[in-house]
């Protein structure tokens, strides 16, 4: 493909750096190879997939993510500040203070079209070793994530349990969905909503603000929990999570919207990374049968298995969702 573009002297291909072009071609080839491998695996094990793998489609957007290596986008530090110097560009891009990137190794840069503009995404390698989970931990911190109570935190070493309220995130999501629906109705008014343009500056701004608030809340919450765990000398953090818990969920229209719109897996990934920097392992525990189980009655809590028809009984009952 690289030879064909060079031979045909494609203007877009010639305008960009050769390494950026080759990275785009590698990404396309990788997508096709993955598709063919998934097709073979799907024919043998269809139960592993939610749907049949789809063929890679054409790029419909005018701009796509461009990947730069550490040769075409160099990371430099000068006078206590960090810069990104692109090849064939005189003016470097300021990316913050130098101390923010200490003890890190620069890997690559990606320029991604996002929210009506462009985001520069930098990848650094950090020497963080995931801590091992102790076989018999004595001090355990348990976390249950949710909507109204974003984190319910308890422990086995006698400290007072506490809640991190999720009302701010819930309210922000509700306002986001309401405002987005209103703006979309204005954009699609008098036209076929299935084919009309759904990207405006106000919609991009709305999505960008929601993303920024979510990221800020997740990192602040994760760091608060890690500092608390370190202060209490917790040996492990256990968080409840069910795989594919948002698939085909049916807890009411309003509850569905509130629950599905919060990226809990993303928060748990941030918590795992943050805790690893402090040397504390994070374990995700499947919790599909915990709603009616009673800790005081020492109910046995089984792990969910697909196809298991066993009727499990518990001491408690659900009184309100």
Image: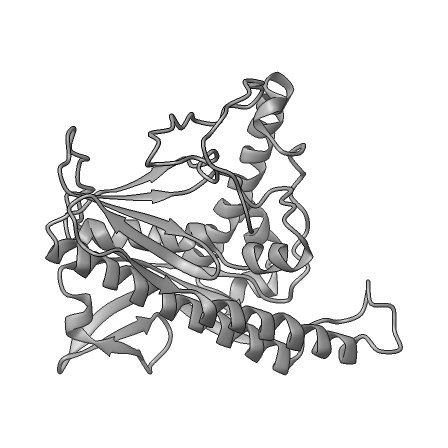
The number of numbered discs placed on residues in the rendered structure image is 0
Visible in this render: residue 73? no
| Residue 257 in picture, x, y percent from top left | 62, 59
Residue 187, image quadrant: bottom right
Question: Picture coordinates of residue 181 (x, y %)?
Answer: 71, 72
Residue located at (14% from left, 65% from top): 102
| Residue 190 picture quarter | bottom right
Q: Residue at x 33, y 45 (%)?
A: 239
114 on left or right of 143: right
In the shown orientation, is residue 250 left or right of residue 171?
A: right
State the residue in front, 66 or 145.
145
Q: Position of residue 46 (x, y in %)?
A: 63, 23
Image quadrant where one finds the N terminus: top right
| Horizontal and vertical percent position of residue 258 | 57, 60
Instruction: Please say if 32 is above or below 79.
Output: above
Going 13% across and 37% down the picture, which residue do you hit? 138
- The residue nearer to you, when weighing 29 against 113, is 113
Report the front residue among 59 and 279.
Answer: 279
Q: Is residue 130 above or below residue 125?
A: above
């Amino acid at each position: 493909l690289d030879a064909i573009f060079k031979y045909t002297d494609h203007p877009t291909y010639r305008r960009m750096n050769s390494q950026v072009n080759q990275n785009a071609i590698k990404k396309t080839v990788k997508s096709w190879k993955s598709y063919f491998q998934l097709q073979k695996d799907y024919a043998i094990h269809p139960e592993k997939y939610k749907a049949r793998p789809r063929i890679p489609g054409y790029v419909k957007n005018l701009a796509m993510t461009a990947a730069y290596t550490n040769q075409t986008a160099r990371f430099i530090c000068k006078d206590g500040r960090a810069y990104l110097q692109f090849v064939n560009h005189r003016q470097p891009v300021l990316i913050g203070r130098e101390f923010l990137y200490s003890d890190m190794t620069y890997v690559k840069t990606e320029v991604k079209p996002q929210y009506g503009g462009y985001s520069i995404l930098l990848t650094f390698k950090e020497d963080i070793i995931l801590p091992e989970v102790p076989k018999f931990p004595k001090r355990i911190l348990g976390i249950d994530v949710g909507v109204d109570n974003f984190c319910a935190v308890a422990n086995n070493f006698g400290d007072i349990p506490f809640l991190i309220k999720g009302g701010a995130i819930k309210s922000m999501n509700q306002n986001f969905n309401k405002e987005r629906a209103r703006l979309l109705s204005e954009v699609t008014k008098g036209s076929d909503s299935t084919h009309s343009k759904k990207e405006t500056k106000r919609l991009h701004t709305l999505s960008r603000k929601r993303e920024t608030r979510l990221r800020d809340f997740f990192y602040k919450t994760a760091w608060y929990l890690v500092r608390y765990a370190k202060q209490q000398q917790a040996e492990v953090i256990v968080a409840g999570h069910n795989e594919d818990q948002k698939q085909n969920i049916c807890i009411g229209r309003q509850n569905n919207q509130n629950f599905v719109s919060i990226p809990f897996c993303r928060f748990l990934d941030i918590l795992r990374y943050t805790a690893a920097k402090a040397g504390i392992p994070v374990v995700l525990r499947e919790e599909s049968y915990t709603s009616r189980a009673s800790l005081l009655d020492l109910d046995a809590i089984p792990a969910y298995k697909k196809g298991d028809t066993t009727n499990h009984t518990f001491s408690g009952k659900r009184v309100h969702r």
